[in-house]
Image (cartoon, rainbow, N blue to C red):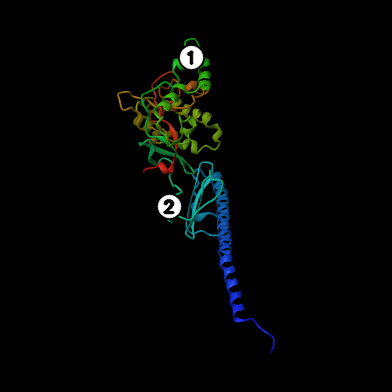
């Protein structure tokens, strides 16, 4: 009975001390919990991407046009109800997930999953584009200059597209002056030497015109004259190839078939529309480019252009037996006045492929 307990003041002091400790420790503990939760979410999204890219790769082995929606990703971890995903040509994913009022997103160029807490669901999911090949987009290429492009590929935040028209007037692939400046001799070099030099020198004159006409395009991250393969990838022919490495031989063989068949409709066609119809009627419509890749082949002036240049000429030894078909050949058949490959002439224009951020898409 005589033992003393804690006085009221002592108890109050203890309570105050505990309250102060709680006041200091609680935010720290909650911060640790929040960091752990966010870390777990990031890990789940990383695993989700791995699972999605693996499934997409499996689809690529059996389909030329794989499709994998966010909700169909075969993932056994945490389920996210709100998300979008897209894939580039290499099967790399761009993903956005909206969870607990937070946005987790990643493109192939990001080192890790990014977590944003100040985004709406619409802004978050809008980070993943669902553009398809051939979609027409209006873009601001820089300095208020507006151009139209057709989508070729989506690479994370970047849209790779083909311009909808040729730039400027027709131009030589490589002019006589530029050919000589690179070390050739236009007047005395044989056909074989010139063909070899074309590969070595490249489209010097056409590239210079491209640079001059796009110097103000400050929003463009990359620009180049397309290669023949860039263009042929748009055809059913290429998409259906089992061994894509043999595309050029296979294409030449298929083109030779239609010429040697003696099909009068094909051999006498002389316009975009008539040749497209003739090739299709003969069962060779798969080698035609989509029409959007062959439109607007005229400048704003009186200069008529038959096509647009490629970045490399064709293999002359491979193509020489069919180059007498008409002036169309070298346009990869007359795909609608599509593309040119010979050097020295100014019949064709420059139509670049450009890469531009999705933030510069106007509509």
Return the residue found at the far bottom: 1
Task: Please give left or right for residue 271 compared with residue 251 in the image.
Answer: left
Q: Residues within 10 Å of mark 1 (few under 14, many from 20)?
A: few
Residues at badges 1 and 2 in contact (C-beta under 8 Å)? Answer: no
Indicate left or right for 248 with 168 as reference: right
Q: Is residue 76 visible?
A: no
Disc sitting over residue 180 in the figure: 1
Decide: few, some or many residues near mark 2? Use Cα within 10 Å; few <14, some 14-19, many ≥20: few
Check the picture and name the quadrant holding the C terminus.
Answer: top left
Residue 95 rendering spot, x and y as whole percentages: 50, 50
Label 2 SS: helix
Percent of width and height locating residue 20:
57, 69
**Nearer to me, 167 or 262:** 167
Badge nearest the viewer, 1 or 2? 2
Q: Quadrant of residue 43?
A: bottom right
Q: In the depicted view, which residue is nearer to us: 24 or 221?
A: 24
Disc 1 is placed on an element classified as helix
- Res 146 → quadrant: top left
The CA span between labels 1 and 2 is 54 Å
Q: Which mark is residue 123?
A: 2
Q: Quadrant of the N terminus?
A: bottom right
Between 264 and 9, the residue placed more toward the observer is 9
Q: Which percent across, then down, holds residue 324? A: 44, 20
Q: Is residue 107 visible?
A: yes
As displayed, is residue 296 above or below residue 83?
above
Label total for image: 2
Residue 257 placement (x, y as % from top left): 47, 28
Name the mark on residue 196: none
x 37%, y 23%: residue? 170
Q: Nearer the viewer, residue 360 or 31?
A: 31
């Amino acid at each position: 009975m005589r033992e003393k307990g804690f006085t009221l003041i002592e108890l109050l002091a203890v309570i105050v001390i505990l309250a102060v400790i709680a006041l200091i420790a609680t935010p720290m503990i909650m911060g640790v919990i929040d960091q752990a939760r966010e870390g777990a979410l990031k890990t789940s999204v990383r695993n989700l991407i791995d699972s999605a890219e693996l499934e997409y790769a499996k689809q690529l082995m059996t389909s030329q046009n794989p499709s994998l929606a966010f909700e169909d990703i075969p993932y056994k971890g945490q389920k996210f109800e709100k998300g979008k995903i897209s894939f580039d040509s290499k099967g790399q994913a761009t993903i956005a997930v909206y969870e607990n009022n937070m946005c987790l997103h990643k493109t192939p160029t990001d080192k890790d999953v990014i977590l944003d807490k100040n985004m709406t669901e619409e802004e978050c999911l809008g980070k993943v584009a669902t553009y398809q090949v051939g979609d027409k987009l209006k873009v601001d290429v820089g300095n208020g200059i507006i151009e139209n492009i057709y989508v070729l590929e989506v690479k994370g935040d970047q849209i790779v597209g083909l311009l909808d028209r040729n730039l400027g007037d027709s131009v030589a692939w490589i002019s006589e002056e530029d050919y000589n400046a690179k070390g050739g001799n236009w007047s005395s070099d044989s056909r074989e030497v010139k063909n070899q030099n074309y590969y070595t020198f490249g489209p010097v004159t056409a590239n210079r015109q491209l640079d001059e006409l796009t110097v103000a395009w400050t929003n463009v991250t990359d620009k180049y004259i397309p290669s023949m393969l860039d263009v042929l990838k748009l055809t059913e022919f290429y998409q259906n190839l089992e061994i894509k490495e043999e595309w050029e031989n296979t294409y030449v063989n298929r083109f030779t078939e239609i010429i040697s068949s003696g099909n009068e409709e094909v051999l006498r066609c002389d316009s975009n529309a008539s040749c497209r119809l003739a090739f299709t009627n003969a069962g060779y419509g798969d080698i035609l480019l989509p029409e959007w890749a062959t439109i607007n082949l005229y400048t704003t002036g009186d200069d008529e252009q038959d096509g647009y240049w490629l970045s490399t000429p064709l293999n002359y030894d491979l193509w020489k037996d069919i180059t007498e078909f008409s002036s169309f050949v070298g346009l990869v058949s007359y795909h609608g006045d599509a593309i040119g490959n010979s050097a020295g002439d100014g019949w064709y224009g420059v139509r670049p492929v450009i890469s531009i951020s999705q933030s510069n898409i106007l509509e």
